Image (tube, grey):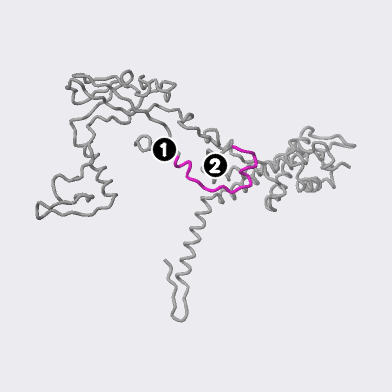
Amino acid sequence: MSSFTTTLNPTPFGFFDSDSAFQTEAEAMVTFVKRRLGDDVLSVELTKKQIWSCFEESFLEYGSIVNQYQAKSQLLSLLGMQTGSLDEATQKLPRDTLNYIVRLAEPYAVEAGLGGTYNSISGSIQLRQNIQDYDLYTELIDPSTNTPVISSSLNPERRKMRVFEIMHYNPSAAYRFFDTTSAINYLNNEFSFESFTPETAFYVLPVFEDILRGGQMNISNRVRRSNYSYRVTGTKLRIFPMPTADNPLRLWVRVGFESSPLNPAFADASINGVSNLSNVPYGNFVYARVNSMARQWVRQFALALAKELLGMIRSKFSSVPIPGGDLQLDGGDLKSSAKEEKEKLRTDLKEMLDSMTYNKLIEIKATEIDNLQKILKSIPVPMGRVITMG
């Protein structure tokens, strides 16, 4: 009599054919299924290969459901990682990372001028006497190539230009004395000061004070010098006030371009990494590594699959002629019963896994801690000693 190991292609996919634990279980599944379906009384019209096929499908179903619920807990940390081999993430507990959260924040950093993923470029416009309007797409020049910025190598697809910053004010050096209305809080330096008024006070201030005051002066120059302003409309830049000098200075503008989310400014391997549930590197489980709870679910689901298959076979004939009458077959009842059993097994497993996602486990632990504190607060302590919680 043929066995699992001596049979050619015992299962349709052969995912577990070399697993010794699966081989041993497959032999026992034949006896288990046939006895549960009444083979000792009435012959069960199922072959060994059909039962082994149900066994393989059952284990694949179990692995698929468990992996789906693992993805609920881990997908945020797995996004962007290499897709890798199919077994890479199945048997590992990944560390949580903030990579995806940082990735979500990068566009806001670009808008705030504080960094980001996409490069920007600075160019200049030669101002002309009594000319107030300039075209950014033709007159903004890249000094390194002496060509319009719109044709920069950073913009091969000639996307829309975005203005980030216009240096339309005279640069101001950081003065030694920041507060021009009072002699108090002057910055200390290597030079000695002579007090001209009795109320003058000098302080030795830390370095960060210099930095903060320098930033304060920069913002003050931008905000209070309201006579220097500009307005961008379409491709046109209008500056205020109108240049009146015979040889006006250049106006410097920092711009960027609408960037493709799939083509950042640097080689980002995560673009080709995990993007959704379909390419997370989850593989098939190893039967030898799953515990008894998993194996029992697989056995019961394989039995339901075998029952459904037997019902389909028997449904092809509503009755079989026998001497003196007809034998009525129960194909319809078997299919209906198998459908209910499969649905119940799936539902029970999903409900259990749903209560064991990482977020749920944290909630359970938090509730446990709260309840423990309530209990400890009500426990009487002898000898006048007391434990205070919280």
**What secondary structure is marked by label 1?**
helix
> Residue 325: x and y, percent?
86, 36
Location of mark 1 (residue): 106
Location of mark 2 (residue): 78
> Residue 155: x and y, percent?
42, 23
Image quarter of the C terminus: bottom left
- State whether residue 21 is above or below residue 313: below
Is residue 221 something that shows in the picture? yes
- Which of the numbered marks, if any, corresponds to residue 159? none
Q: Amino acid at mark 2?
A: Leu
Please give left or right for residue 178 compared with residue 301 in the image. left
Do the residues under discs 2 and 1 have CB atoms within 8 angstroms? Answer: no
Badge count:
2
- State whether residue 98 is above or below residue 268: below
Image quarter of the N terminus: top right
- Alpha-carbon span between mark 2 and mark 1: 18 Å
State the residue in front, 36 or 293.
Answer: 293
Mark toward the viewer: 2 or 1: 1
Picture quadrant where residue 214 is located:
top left
Packing grade of label 1 (10 A; few <14, some 14-19, many >=20) is some
Range of magenta residues: 83-102
Is residue 333 something that shows in the picture? no
> Residue 132: x and y, percent?
21, 21
> Residue 146: x and y, percent?
35, 20
State the residue in front, 294 or 326.
Answer: 294
Q: Is residue 85 magenta?
A: yes
Q: Residue at x 26, y 47 (%)?
A: 210
Picture quadrant where residue 126 is located:
top left
Mark positioned earlier in the residue sequence (2 or 1):
2
**What secondary structure is marked by label 2?**
helix
Q: Residue furthest right?
A: 323
State the residue in front, 258 or 241.
Answer: 241
